[in-house]
Image: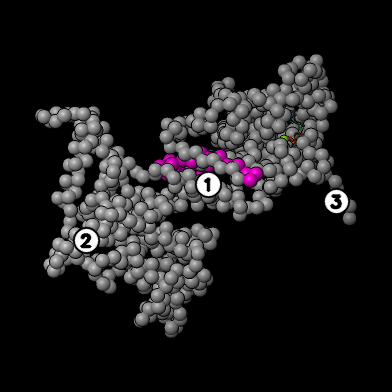
C-alpha cells in the first residue's frame, strides 16, 4: 500500500527522452524538423565535439513570442495538432510535442527566438529541466537553440555516447536525410568551426547528391536513372543507380514520403524486386525514392521518432513502386559495353593506302566483319558435345528442342536442307545476323552497330529464370509424369524440409511421394527443366530450401527459381548446333530483360564499330 507515486514532470520527460533522444544526432534531427515546420528557408547547424559539447541550430522561421517560448518546452506541448481529427492528416514533421521537453530535461538549453515584427527577442535557459525566467534580449527573426553537454547529469547515458567522429557520422546521416527531402532549403553544417556542408536552396537533386555523397559525385550524371510517375493521388520520383553502382549494404537507399525520410521494409523490398535479375542478390542498389500521397493514406504515429509509417494500402504502394522502377530500369541499355584500352597509349601504325574517312572506315569494318563471319561460319549443325548426349546431367530444355531435324554433313541433300534453314532465318531479321560459337562457351553475334559476345550459360540461365518466374506466377509449372519414378534417399531433416515446403514443390510441378522408411520417389518433374538430373536437382532444391528457410516466401521462391535456372541452363563447354544457337538468340530477343543473369553477372558484352575503329586507329 502506498507504493505508487506519480512521477514528476521532469522524470516523465527524462523517460520520454530515453525514446526520442538517443544521441546528439537525434537532437539535430528534432531541431531541424522544428525549424522546417516553422517555415524557415535557411538553417545553420553548428557542432562541437561531435555534438557532445554543443549543438546549435539557427533558423529564419516564424519564431515564437515569450508565451509560446515557455510552453514549447513543456511536456506534450505543440502548436501542430489540436484535436484527434488532426492526427488523421499530419502535414508537419513534428506533432507529438515532446522533443523540446525531452531535450531540455537531459541537457543545458538556451533558446533565443523572435517573431517577425516584434521589437525584441526572448531568451529562455533550462538546465536539465530547471527553467530560468524568460528574459527579453536582442536577436534575429527566427529561432536559435543551443544544446550543451547532452546527458551530462546522466552518466549512464553519457557513457553510451561514442567518439566525436562516430557521433558526427550519425549527425551527418540525419542532416543528409533532411537535405535530400528539402531541396528548397539553404542548409549549412559546421563542426568545430569548420564548414562541412553548404547546400544552396533550390539546387538540383543530382547536385545535392554529389555534395552529400562525394563517392557518387563522378557518377550522378551518367549512372543515375530518373523515374517519374503519377497515378491518382500518388506521385513518385526516383533517381536509381545503374547496376554498376551497387553496394554491399543498403545504406545508399533513401525513401521519402511527403518530405519525411522513412525506413520501410515494403519500399526496400519493392526496390529490391525492381532490380531483380539486374543485380547479384547480395548487392544493393543505390536508390533515392521520393513519394507524395495524401496524408490520410498512411499513419505516421506508429514510432516515437516517426521514422516508420503504416500505409493503409500497402500492397498497392508496393506494386506501384516496384512497377514504376522496374519499367524504367528495363527500358535502359544496361548492357555491359566493352572497355578496351585507350588506343592513344599505343604505338600508331599508319596503314599505307587506307583512306581515313570515318564513314568509309565504318563500311570497310562492317564488310570485313561480315566476310569474317561468313568464312568462319560453322557447319549448320556441328556435332554435339558430349554433354548433350542422352542421359547426361545437362538439360535440353524446351527452348532447345530442335525446330528442324538435325542436319549433318553426310545427310543426303544436305545442301538443300541447309539452304532452306538459312532462308527461313533470313526472313526473320531478329536472329539472321551471322554468329559463331567460340570455345564451346561464347557466342559472337554480329549486330547492326558492331558485334556482341554472349556468355551462353549466363544468357540461357537468365531466359529460363524469367520464364520460370512468369510461369510460376500464374499456375504450377507444367510437369511430366515419369515412366520410371526416380528414387531418393533422404535424411530426417531433408524430408521434413520437403514437407514444410510442399507448396513450393507443387508450384514447380514436382511430385515426391514416400516409398520406404527413408526412401522417396519423384513421380513427376517440370518439362521446362527438361532432362536435368532429377535426383541431384531435388537434393539441391532441399539444400536451397533449408538455406533460405528464414526468408520471406517470395524471396524463398526466388532463390529456388534462380537455382533451378542455373541447374537447367546449358553450360559453358557445351557445343551448340546452329539451330540451338538461333533458338537461344531468338529467345534472347523475346526476353523481358536479359542483360544480366540472375546472379547479376552480365550475359552480353557489346562491341561497337566506333570502338573498333578507334582501336585500329581508323578514325
Ligand atoms: P512538436 O514539434 O512535435 O510540436 P516540439 O517539442 O519539437 O514538438 O516543439 C514544440 C513546439 O515548439 C512546436 O509545436 C512549435 O510550436 C514550437 N517550436 C519548436 N521549435 C521551433 C522553431 N524552431 N521555430 C518556431 N517554433 C518552434
Ligand atoms: Mg518537433
Instruction: Tell me: 235 left or right of 505.
Output: right
The residue that mark 1 highlights is: 324
**Can you give x and y, in whole percent of width and height, for residue 522 in the image?**
41, 77
> Which numbered disc, 3 or 1, marks the residue that appears first in the sequence?
3
- Residue displayed at 48% across by 47% down: 327
> Which numbered disc, 2 or 1, marks the residue that appears first in the sequence?
1
- Residue displayed at 74% across by 25% down: 62
- Magenta residues, as a range? 232-254
Instruction: Tell me: 596 left or right of 349.
Output: right
Q: Nearer the viewer, residue 227 or 456?
A: 227
Residue 282 highlighted magenta (yes or no) = no
The local secondary structure at tag 2 comes to helix
The residue that mark 3 highlights is: 4
The residue that mark 2 highlights is: 420
The quarter of the image holding the N terminus is: bottom right
Q: Nearer the viewer, residue 149 or 44?
A: 44
Q: Nearer the viewer, residue 595 or 131?
A: 595
Q: Is residue 15 visible?
A: no
Instruction: Point out the frontmost of discs 3 and 1.
Output: 1
Give the distance between the C-alpha atoms of the residues marked 3 and 1, in whole angstroms. Answer: 56 Å
Check disc 2: other Cα within 10 Å, few if <14, some if 14-19, many if 20+: few
* Mark 3 touches mark 1? (CB < 8 Å): no
The local secondary structure at tag 1 comes to helix
- Residue displayed at 68% across by 33% down: 33
Check disc 3: other Cα within 10 Å, few if <14, some if 14-19, many if 20+: few
- Residue displayed at 53% across by 46% down: 324
- Answer above or below: position of 304 versus 613: below
**Can you give x and y, in whole percent of width and height, for residue 178 in the image?**
61, 34
Q: Residue furthest right?
A: 2
Instruction: Point out the frontmost of discs 2 and 1.
Output: 2
Amino acid at each position: 500500500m502506498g507504493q505508487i507515486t506519480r512521477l514528476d514532470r521532469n522524470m516523465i520527460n527524462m523517460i520520454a527522452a530515453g525514446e526520442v533522444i538517443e544521441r546528439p544526432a537525434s537532437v539535430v534531427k528534432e531541431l531541424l524538423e522544428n525549424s522546417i515546420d516553422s517555415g524557415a528557408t535557411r538553417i545553420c547547424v553548428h557542432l562541437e565535439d561531435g555534438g557532445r559539447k554543443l549543438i546549435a541550430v539557427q533558423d529564419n522561421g516564424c519564431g515564437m513570442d515569450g508565451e509560446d517560448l515557455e510552453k514549447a518546452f513543456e511536456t506534450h506541448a505543440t502548436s501542430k495538432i489540436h484535436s484527434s481529427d488532426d492526427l488523421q492528416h499530419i502535414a508537419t514533421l513534428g506533432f507529438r510535442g515532446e522533443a523540446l521537453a525531452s531535450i531540455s530535461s537531459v541537457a543545458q538549453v538556451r533558446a533565443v527566438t523572435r517573431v517577425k515584427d516584434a521589437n525584441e527577442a526572448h531568451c529562455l535557459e533550462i538546465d536539465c529541466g530547471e527553467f530560468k525566467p524568460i528574459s527579453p534580449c536582442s536577436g534575429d527573426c527566427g529561432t536559435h537553440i543551443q544544446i550543451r553537454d547532452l546527458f551530462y547529469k546522466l552518466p549512464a547515458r553519457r557513457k553510451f555516447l561514442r567518439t566525436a567522429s562516430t557521433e558526427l557520422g550519425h549527425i551527418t546521416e540525419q542532416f543528409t536525410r533532411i537535405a535530400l527531402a528539402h531541396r528548397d532549403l539553404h542548409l549549412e553544417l559546421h563542426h568545430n568551426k569548420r564548414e562541412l556542408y553548404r547546400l544552396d536552396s533550390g539546387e538540383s537533386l543530382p547536385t545535392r547528391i554529389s555534395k552529400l555523397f562525394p563517392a557518387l559525385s563522378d557518377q550522378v550524371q551518367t549512372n543515375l536513372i530518373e523515374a517519374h510517375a503519377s497515378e491518382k493521388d500518388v506521385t513518385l520520383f526516383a533517381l536509381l543507380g545503374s547496376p554498376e553502382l551497387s553496394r554491399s549494404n543498403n545504406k545508399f537507399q533513401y525513401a521519402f514520403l511527403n518530405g519525411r525520410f522513412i525506413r520501410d521494409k515494403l519500399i526496400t523490398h519493392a526496390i529490391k524486386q525492381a532490380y531483380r535479375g539486374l543485380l547479384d542478390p547480395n548487392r544493393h542498389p543505390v536508390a533515392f525514392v521520393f513519394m507524395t500521397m495524401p496524408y490520410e493514406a498512411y499513419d505516421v504515429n506508429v514510432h516515437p521518432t516517426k521514422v516508420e509509417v503504416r500505409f493503409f494500402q500497402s500492397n498497392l504502394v508496393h506494386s506501384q513502386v516496384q512497377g514504376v522502377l522496374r519499367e524504367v530500369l528495363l527500358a535502359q541499355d544496361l548492357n555491359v559495353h566493352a572497355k578496351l584500352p585507350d588506343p592513344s597509349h599505343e604505338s600508331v601504325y599508319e596503314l599505307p593506302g587506307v583512306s581515313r574517312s570515318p564513314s568509309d572506315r565504318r563500311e570497310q569494318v562492317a564488310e570485313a566483319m561480315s566476310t569474317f563471319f561468313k568464312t568462319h561460319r560453322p557447319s549448320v549443325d556441328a556435332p554435339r558435345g558430349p554433354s548433350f548426349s542422352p542421359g547426361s546431367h545437362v538439360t535440353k530444355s524446351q527452348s532447345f528442342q530442335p525446330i528442324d531435324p538435325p542436319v549433318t554433313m553426310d545427310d543426303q541433300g544436305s545442301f538443300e536442307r541447309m539452304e532452306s534453314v538459312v532462308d527461313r532465318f533470313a526472313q526473320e531479321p531478329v536472329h539472321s545476323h551471322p554468329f559463331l560459337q567460340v570455345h564451346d562457351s561464347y557466342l559472337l553475334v554480329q549486330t547492326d552497330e558492331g558485334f556482341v559476345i554472349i556468355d551462353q550459360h549466363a544468357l540461357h540461365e537468365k531466359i529460363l529464370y524469367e520464364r520460370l518466374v512468369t510461369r510460376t506466377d500464374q499456375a504450377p509449372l507444367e510437369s511430366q509424369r515419369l515412366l520410371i519414378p526416380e528414387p531418393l534417399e533422404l535424411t530426417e531433416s531433408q524430408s521434413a524440409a520437403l514437407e514444410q515446403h510442399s507448396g513450393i514443390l507443387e508450384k514447380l510441378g514436382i511430385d515426391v511421394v514416400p516409398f520406404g522408411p527413408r526412401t522417396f520417389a519423384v513421380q513427376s518433374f517440370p518439362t521446362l527443366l527438361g532432362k536435368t538430373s532429377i535426383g541431384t536437382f531435388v537434393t539441391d532444391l532441399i539444400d536451397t530450401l533449408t538455406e533460405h528457410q528464414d526468408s520471406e516466401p517470395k524471396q524463398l521462391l526466388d532463390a529456388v527459381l534462380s537455382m533451378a535456372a542455373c541447374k537447367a541452363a546449358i553450360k559453358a563447354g557445351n557445343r551448340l548446333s546452329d539451330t540451338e544457337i538461333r533458338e537461344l538468340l531468338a529467345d534472347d530477343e523475346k526476353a523481358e530483360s536479359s542483360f544480366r543473369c540472375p546472379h547479376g553477372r552480365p550475359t552480353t558484352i557489346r562491341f561497337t564499330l566506333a570502338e573498333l575503329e578507334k582501336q585500329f586507329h581508323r578514325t
